[in-house]
Amino acid sequence: MSLYCFIINPVAGKGKGRKAAEFLKNEIVARSLDAEVYFTNNRDDARVLAAQARAGVIVAVGGDGTVNEVVNGIVGTDKALAVVPSGSGNDLVKSIGVPADMFQALEVLREGRRALIDVAVVRCSSSDPSGISGNLDERYFVNGVGIGFDAAVAERTTSIKYLGGFALYLMAVLQTLGRYSAPTFRIRLDAESIERKQLLIAIGNGRCAGGGFYLTPRAEIDDGALDVCLIDDMSVPSILKLMPKVMKGKHHGFAGVRLTRTERISVEASEGFYVHADGEIVGRGVHNVDVEIRKRLLPVIVGEKLKRGT
């Protein structure tokens, strides 16, 4: 039985995945790593490969979507997650102290520091039989769930072919502005209920989403809670003023923005809406979402220390 199982998404990051594959083939030999290597070809391959792997450490080589699939294959087992980032967003690594540089990420893997992090569960449902396309009955996530505008942006990224990284998400935001109509959401948190038009509802286990938007900058990935960013429906000029603050995680106190914390959140709307989990669309035409935390459930290879919220 090998110590490591590398699961590589060769199409991650608009070409980064292929470069990562070549780099890792050489590094695995150079470092004499006891490793198996598998490549994904289709959606959900990483989940299946991770579930079947006998190695103790499953290394997700790709973006947050690849990480999400691997997590859904190993959560509840004794396998540990490791990440070598090569996607467009690479948001989870910002919370677990893993460098974006692949060589440095392999050093973190070799050092083998472990921490138990929280995982959360998202469930989507719809009154429309054509809704929730692409969703599993129950899906785990490690970084975050987005409802509304940011999920519509995640959907938009799939049609932008020639950009990667933060530029991809920024272009998707700009293309979605002015086209998105905010539903009236009914939101239930641990201690209160809210009903109002919301531009977006970001539910963060990690701090960052969309490759560089710190919607939940105070989130800590092992604190047993979900951080929530609620942004009211607002004009395009107001959104453009807000964006630079979100990119720095300094949007607390901006008119129409609220940051809070909960262990469970339910969201409903009469109009169908998009939902993403770790950047991957898990629901279209959704009418109800339930999200809840699972405390310190997943062993992860981490950097020198976990990144703490601000």
Image (spheres, helix red, strand yellow):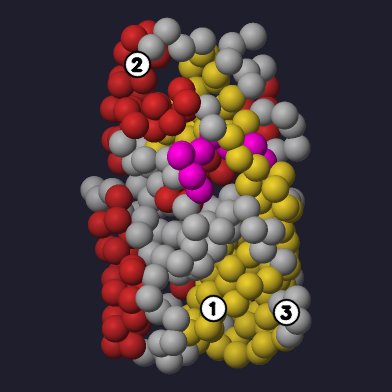
Q: Is residue 126 visible?
A: no
Callout 3 environment at 10 Å: few (<14), some (14 to 19), or many (20+)? some
Give the residue pinned by disc 1.
259
N-term-proximal mark, 3 vs 2: 2
Most extreme residue toward the front, as rendered?
A: 304
Indicate the quadrant where residue 15 lies: top left
- Secondary element at image label 2: helix
| Amino acid at the residue labelled 3 | Arg
Up-down relation of residue 54 to residue 90 (above or below): above
* Residue under the point 34% across and 31% down: 104
Alpha carbon distance from label 3 to label 2: 48 Å
Up-down relation of residue 179 to residue 206 (above or below): below
Of the pair 307 and 147, the residue shown nearer to us:
307
| Amino acid at the residue labelled 2 | Glu
Q: Where does residue 80 sit, x and y in percent of width and height?
A: 62, 31
**Residue 247: within the magenta?**
no
The total of numbered circles placed on residues is 3
Of the pair 185 and 278, the residue shown nearer to us:
278
Q: Is residue 215 visible?
A: yes
Q: Where does residue 227 sit, x and y in percent of width and height?
A: 59, 68
- Say which quadrant the N terminus sits in: top right
On the rendered structure, is 112 left or right of 106?
right
Magenta range is: 298-306
On the rendered structure, is 7 left or right of 21?
right
Give the residue pinned by disc 2.
27
Q: Which mark is residue 188?
A: 3
N-term-proximal mark, 1 vs 2: 2
Q: Which mark is residue 186?
A: none
* Residue under the point 49% across and 44% down: 305
* Residue under the point 66% across and 51% down: 118
